[in-house]
């Protein structure tokens, strides 16, 4: 994990991107957009994909009608204003949680080891919700391999998720899965050595153009970034792994 110099890079969204349906071939859909826009993946590209797109492709949908809130979920719902069914899903998906303020948001340590706002639960209208991919690093590896099959290019994949911080308002973007790129980068200068959460930096860079509210661009390509190849995945840099 030696420091890799990057003096500049480019980033672009894959758009227009069709609305994904549960069970869709995500790599095939990405390839279709590339073909329609006359764009090709190149060796060394990093494909950053919003976690919701992966969740949709992997059918991680939950019907809220099937969720029965318990007493703790009902109490937290009263404090935060979140639907009790969503709160129950947060509790079911996490090991521990706390409120950033008296009214939330709920910051939870997911059973996968990530600390995420609302345990990464994403609302799907008023009737459902999307859970995180069951194994985001495995999802990234599978997507990376499929993209290579479709394109012939050797690329890395980072799965990115919007996330809030307990100390401030607003959302940022972090990595929850990765393949083909080392999750940590070590930089050294002036005798000082620093580990950097490199896939988070990649996710944040892509987050400037990835789809958030009101923008349908769930996939971005970063080009020109120097990186060490690795399939360790994001789980390798977590303090608490399942």
Image: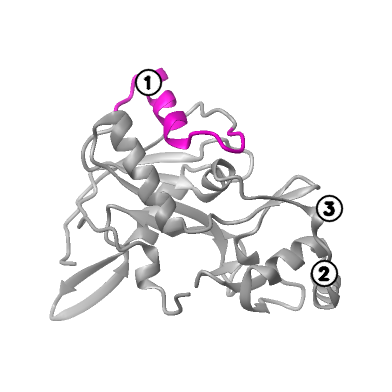
Residue 194 falls in image quadrant: bottom left
Q: Secondary structure at mark 1?
A: helix
Q: Name the residue beneath numbered marker 3.
A: 65
Mark toward the start of the polypeptide (2 vs 3) = 3
Mark 1 vs mark 3, foreground winner is 3
Q: Nearer the viewer, residue 224 or 56?
A: 56
Q: Secondary structure at mark 3?
A: helix
Mark toward the start of the polypeptide (2 vs 1) = 1
Q: Residues within 10 Å of mark 3 (few under 14, many from 20)?
A: few
Q: CA distance from mark 2 to mark 1?
A: 46 Å
162 vs 184, left or right, is: right
Decide whether residue 43 is among the magenta residues: no
Q: CA distance from mark 1 to mark 3?
A: 40 Å
| Residue range corresponding to the magenta coloring | 20-40
Q: Position of residue 174 (x, y in %)?
A: 46, 60
Q: Name the residue beneath numbered marker 2.
A: 77
Cβ atoms under marks 2 and 1 closer than 8 Å:
no
Asked if 50 appears above or below 27 in the picture, the reply is: below
């Amino acid at each position: 994990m030696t420091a890799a110099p990057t003096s500049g890079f480019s980033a672009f969204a894959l758009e227009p991107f069709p609305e994904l349906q549960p069970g869709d071939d995500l790599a095939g859909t990405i390839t279709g957009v590339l073909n329609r826009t006359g764009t090709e993946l190149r060796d060394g590209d990093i494909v950053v994909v919003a976690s919701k797109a992966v969740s949709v492709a992997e059918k991680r949908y939950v019907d809220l009608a099937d969720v029965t809130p318990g007493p703790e979920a009902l109490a937290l719902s009263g404090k935060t204003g979140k639907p009790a069914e969503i709160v129950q899903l947060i509790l079911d998906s996490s090991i521990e949680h706390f409120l950033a303020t008296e009214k939330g948001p709920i910051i939870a340590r997911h059973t996968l080891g990530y600390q995420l706002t609302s345990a990464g639960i994403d609302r799907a209208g008023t009737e459902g919700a999307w859970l995180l991919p069951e194994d985001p690093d495995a999802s990234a590896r599978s997507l990376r391999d499929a993209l290579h099959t479709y394109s012939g290019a050797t690329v890395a994949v980072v799965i990115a998720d919007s996330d809030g911080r307990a100390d401030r308002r607003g959302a940022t973007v972090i990595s929850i899965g990765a393949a083909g790129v080392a999750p940590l980068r070590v930089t050294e200068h002036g005798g000082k050595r620093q580990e950097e959460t490199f896939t988070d930096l990649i996710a944040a860079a892509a987050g400037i153009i990835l789809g958030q509210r009101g923008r349908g661009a769930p996939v971005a390509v970063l080009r020109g970034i120097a990186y060490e190849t690795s399939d360790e995945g994001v789980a390798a840099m977590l303090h608490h792994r399942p």
